[in-house]
Amino acid sequence: MSERIWIMGASDGIGAALAREWARRGARLVLSARSHDKLTALAAEIGGAEVLACDVADRGSLEDAARQIKAGGQLDRAITLAALYDPGKVMQIDPDRAAQIVTVNLTGCFNFARAAEPLLKQGGQLALTGSVAGYIGLPQGQIYSATKAGVINLAESLRVELAPAVDVRLICPGFVVTQLTQQNDFDMPALMQPDDAASAILKGLDGRGFEVHFPRRLTLPLKLLRALPYPLALLLTKRLVT
């Protein structure tokens, strides 16, 4: 029987690319994001899907969506890619905008995990999306990077707490062409297209590893930087300040 998969953040970017790829594989999809119109258009493009507009920052809307999903049976996988981004230095961002980013990126992952976990079959997969930006604090990382560090930590905790009933996975992409990265005014190394990112994610989620990270020519140096003692790591990151 084909997999039933809930994708949060499916309206564009990597989420939409994942929906297209899973649809080609014959999966039964539940598409969610805040934009009902975009989801409806995507569902029509891929030959049909269940559309449930909701917001990870709104627990009530997630609970309503979960009730509707439950009526259709258990899920094989649930993945959230919903995020906000606002580039710049930490002390320059508007505090209200910073709070909104924390609510969507970090608390939103927590909200989604709570809503999705009871819907998953035994051994079903729950995937949270962090970022290589969460590996270590970098200049211009702002609150976005801090929230992604929190998501990484959250996924690590859930991996242990929910096993073996739930197969928790962490996705840490590098730079991908999306509406978020289009805001950047700096060179983005190893920039990827959403379709390529989706292929990397599907390959990783079909494997056995906890973390799916890509492209490795970017992620591995950052992992090494994170592993260095603080005096050396901070000396190196200081050179990136403009």
Image: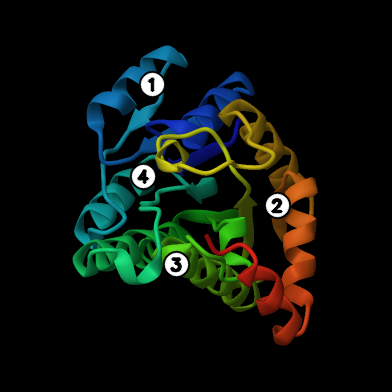
Say which element carries label 4: helix
Front disc: 2 or 1: 2
Choose the circle earlier in sequence order: 4 or 2: 4
Which label belongs to residue 147? 3
Measure how far apart labels 4 and 1 are at the Cα level: 16 Å
Which label belongs to residue 210? none
Q: Amino acid at mark 2?
A: Val
Q: Which residue is mark 4?
A: 69
Residue 78 lies left or right of residue 224; in this view the side is: left
Which label belongs to residue 212? 2
Looking at this view, is 21 or 130 the one in front? 130
Residue 123 appears in view: no
Measure how far apart labels 2 and 1 are at the Cα level: 26 Å
Q: Residue at x 40, y 53 (%)?
A: 87
Measure how far apart labels 4 and 3 are at the Cα level: 28 Å
Front disc: 3 or 1: 3
Measure how far apart labels 4 and 2 are at the Cα level: 26 Å
